[in-house]
Amino acid sequence: MLVVLVMALAWAIHYAYISFPIISGYGAKQMCTCIFASGMDKAYLEKNELGDFPLSLASYEVNMKDSSVTGSVWGMAKKKAIYRKGIGATLINDISEAALRSQVFNIPPPPVLKTDTIPWPMGDKLPDSLPADINKEKLLSAVDKAFEEPFTDKKVRTRAVVVLYNGQLVAEKYAPGFNKNMPMYGWSMAKSFTASLIGTLVKQGKLNITKPAPVPEWSDPKDPRHAITLENLLQQQSGLGFKEDYTGASDVTNMLYKEDDMAAFTAGHKLVNTPGTVFNYTSGNSNIISRIIRQTVGEQDYAAYPANALFNKIGMYSAFFEPDASGTYVGSSYIMATARDYARFGLLYYNDGICNGERILPEGWVHQTAAAPASNKTKEYGYQFWLNGIDTTNLSKRIYPDVPADMYYCDGYGYQNIYIIPSKKIVVVRLGLTLDKSFDENTFLKNIIAAITD
């Protein structure tokens, strides 16, 4: 019996040592962003975003004076996140708070515009009528159904839905407490935005995705990782041995909640597969890509680059990335924007990378984004976008069988999604907090498509 007790105690100590900092770090970071960027309430966050085990083990102190949140588990494993206007919240990891607060991010403020007087998509003025080929009742019913809570043991928790048809905003709804002006987490949808920034640099001739990725840790030609191309990283085929598991301590949770320089942490991993041969979805790949953007753009222009090269050009004035403690934007996971602004991003891809008469993404980039590599035998994935499938006849090969095979989409934790369906002229944004797979994406999209009579 004593041996069993000792073993149990040892396990508990080990679990606390590796897991408590992740729990308190996640909660502090999440609460800091949601309170200071989204204007959400601490009690609401504790009940919803942080109400499930093991996140419910933590408690939080909110300091409104210095815009920070400190999380701890039973007084242990304290983690502090600070909020800085324009770049959101950052966890203090391997750096002093004074040093973190001294970092400078020169980001131009969004233009002062009366968006309600500017036609969509560069503004928020909408037409008074819907296109004739839309069944309004069916469309509104499809949107309303996404907000229903039909289960007693599950929580759908849809927060926002925006539907575009042929570029026009034709339907929009928000849950109580949420609205069209509230920035919301995109989570892993950030990966698609990071890939788009790579596209802007390819267009400028500053990057070639088929050449070895410019990663300092792999610069030696004798290093087997030197063979990893930027395209391998985009397509999640780097070959790095990186574990993406959010159920406990793993490479991804350690990276997001314990590391100051997430790209350097990932770049230090070894190869387990030949680059370009095996699909392994990891946030680490995306953060290496994000640091490549920083190195390519240069320190003087880096902080403002997402706004100058992408967000402001397409009318996404609410959008911002959040950086890690090293100052690199967490391109895998931390992006904030309103639902309408996420829809504007989907519209950019629907329009082949062109917005307001300007080509933002290089010619052919959208086509490449929506095409899986020939070596990808098990997953349909493009340039940091998920694909519904490329088989137009065998529906079993589609992730969503009732949705056209040409759909591709951004996908984030909790079912944050931007769906782009070119053949149906549809872009759909759905944001929420669904942690139990209770949201039926296939039926949701099927019902929206059915409302279009074209």
Image: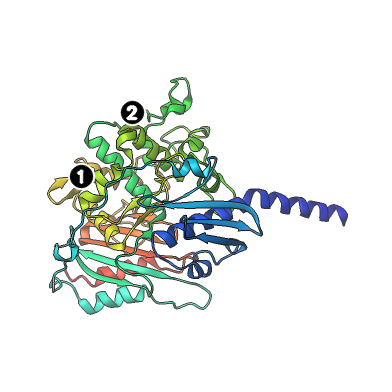
Furthest residue in direction right, as rendered: 1
Q: Amino acid at mark 2?
A: Lys
Image quadrant where one finds the N terminus: bottom right
Residue 352 vertical placement versus 130 (above, below): above
Q: Residue furthest front?
A: 65
Answer above or below: position of 435 versus 240.
Answer: below
Q: Position of residue 350 (x, y in %)?
A: 22, 54
Q: At numbered mark 2, what does the secondary structure look like: helix, strand or loop? A: loop
| Disc 1: CA contacts within 10 A as few (<14), some (14-19) or many (>=20) | many
What residue is shown with label 1?
A: 360
Q: CA distance from mark 1 to mark 2?
A: 22 Å
Q: Quadrant of the C terminus?
A: bottom left
Q: Determine whether, in the image, residue 367 is placed left or right of residue 53.
A: left
Which labelled disc corresponds to residue 211? 2
Q: Residues within 10 Å of mark 2 (few under 14, many from 20)?
A: some
Answer yes or no: is residue 445 visible. Answer: yes
| Mark positioned earlier in the residue sequence (1 or 2) | 2
Front of the two marks 1 and 2: 1
Residue shown at 31%/52% (left/top)? Answer: 391
Residue displayed at 47% across by 20% down: 222
